[in-house]
Image (tube, grey):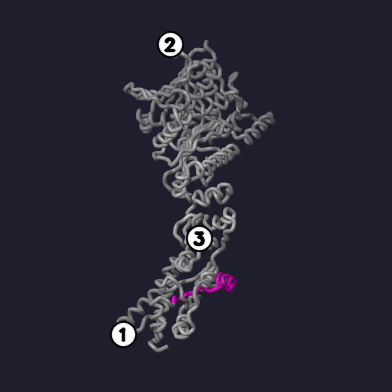
Amino acid sequence: MALDGRPLNRRAAGLRTGAAPTGPAAGSTVPAPPTSFFLPPVVAGAFTERLHRVSPSESAHTFQVDLRGLVDLLSHHLYSSPRVYLRELLQNAVDAITARQALDPGAPGAITVRTGDVLTVTDTGVGLTEADVHRFLATIGRSSKRTADGALDGAGLDAARGEFIGQFGIGLLACFVVADEITVVSRSASDPSAPAVEWRGHSDGRYTIRTLPASEAPGPGTTVRLVPRADNAEWTSPQQVVRLARHYGGLLRHEVTVVDSRGETHRINEAPPWERSHRSPLARREALTAYCRDLFDFTPLDSIELDLPAAGLRGVAYVLPTAVSPAQRAGHRVHLKGMLLTDKAPELLPEWAFFVRCVVDTTSLRPTASRESLYEDGTLSAVRDALGDRIRDWLTGLAASDPSLLHRFIDTHHLAVKALARYDDELLRVVLPWLPFETTDGNVTLEEFVRTHPAVLVTRSVEEFRQVAPIAAAAGLGVVNGGYTYDRDLVHRLPEIRPGTSVTDLDPATVTAHLDAVDPTAELRAAGFLAVARETIGAHDCDVVLRDFQPVTAPALLLDNREARHERTRADLAADSDGLWADILGSLRHETPRAQLVLNHLNPLVRQAITITERGLAVTTAEALYGQALLLSRRPLRASESALLNRAFIGLLTHAMHRPDAAAPGSEPRKEL
């Protein structure tokens, strides 16, 4: 069994300062440091060059490592949890079996974990000779899969390098996170005449080696024994070991068994459903769905099989049955040659594919040193793009193969589809007619909407849509709310899909043009009230006009645009600032169309208001109508607008209570228009 882990940097693998320690006599105790370790390539190269040029007065030395400090570094900074100890043991066992089967394809492959006061992991792998033990178990960073220059050890093993999981040379140290003493008993399959050997290591850096009689290890393989520390006993309890073994090794290709303290046997791994044969496509689909329920605890809308032979990747993407936020990127489960690498790998898929959860097994993606995330390189980028293409192909195929499923998917994940369709012309043509949008006809698809509105108007914001929707609907205008994410961009691409359809941005003047002018006689009668209203509301950068429009129930309409809102915001900031900042804001002033308060002459409230002859009541009524229009627009109110509403309500209450001697705060004494 190759009891190593991996180098902190693959390119630095094998670059070690100093010579490897030679093996002491059997049964001897090797004191704590010196313990060898590895440097990054640039540092190691410079250091080696320096050693070759030492002067007679200089002497070369080997760096020392505090093993306790290194274990603390692993447990608190490199690994996220002590539970990784079992992953490292399983990984080493798998690699040992892989190495033996490279030499002897018919060799058995089994891993047995026994729990109790002592935890043991036994494999039928290639095993170690006494020389191997000195080289690999006593040298931090030395991997049995590599020679001193970074190549693989062992004849015939070089071709099997891609099958190894660990190549970093630090895996065994993870066991010191949960135990102070590790015992390794091993017998080599590559040298049948070699005796069994026992290596006993301690967390302070000491280790002993002794040879054993053949009866202690009758067959090739390795057994690792751990005596758990009291403060980490929870990670080695029988229930925890079974759970961790299934979590990490559920997809391993070699048989893994856990035997608890009562002698009960638990089979850990089995082939995933995408690797098994099924009696029918329906049975396969049901097996994939059942696997999702067991693994992710939800029933998917659909299962998308993933198969990238060039990357050695297979698995399934499960479509979530409920909507999720685009910012909530899903955690995907990635297995490396059957061993779980991480269950939180959002980088596996493009950002737009947040509506699926994946489980994959791969042979080509590289892990980081902690083996808990993926290394970002060209291979990962290519795999991410290829998986994105596979999900897109599934989506475009639904329109022809299963329209009802497409409807259910879009109802749930329309935001994700819109995000993808913005940049994918093929998908845009397929799904745009199916996507729902908020319009003056309700929530309908664009396909339905353009049947009655070949000239489509689209707003820039939700506020603009809410301002004009009731009036535009009554006037027969077709308006789409473009204020939501991606909607405006997609609506503007509609003519590409449906030639003959026109799409333009909505301008307040467009709505005003569809409002009927008031009879001149009626406008003359309302001139006094309108003059007061324009004077009062003009302080808020808003004009007042009188028109006839539907629906009759709407007393007033506030027409605004983005430029006017920006100018008001600038003016507010300039008024609250002083010095240089106020001068800068003042220099940005520019003339923009003012907002318009359109009073509906058909509305009974407005008809009553224009007959008011008393100035104070006219001011209060104009402010109340403006405040009501503000509320109907559903946009956030500024402080001055909130004060206006309060003042209008107080004024109306004052007039309603018939107190001629009282005046609303801030209003003038009562007088006729």
Q: Is label 3 in a helix, a strand or a loop?
A: helix
> Sequence order check: which comes first, mark 3 or mark 1?
3
Residue 290 position, x and y percent, is 40, 34
Above or below for 61 versus 647: above
Residue 421 position, x and y percent, is 55, 50
At label 2, the amino acid type is Ser
Mark 1 highlights which residue? Answer: 659
- Distance between the Cα atoms at labels 1 and 2? 112 Å
Note whether residue 73 is visible: no
Mark 3 highlights which residue? Answer: 452
Question: Is residue 582 found left or right of 283 in the rendered image?
Answer: right
Q: Quadrant of residue 269?
A: top left
Residue 61 position, x and y percent, is 60, 29
Q: Is label 1 in a helix, a strand or a loop?
A: loop
> Sequence order check: which comes first, mark 1 or mark 2?
2
Above or below for 307 versus 116: below
At label 1, the amino acid type is Arg
Mark 2 highlights which residue? Answer: 215
Mark in front: 1 vs 2: 1
Q: Is label 2 in a helix, a strand or a loop?
A: helix
Magenta-highlighted residues: 581-600
Above or below for 90 versus 615: above
At label 3, the amino acid type is Thr
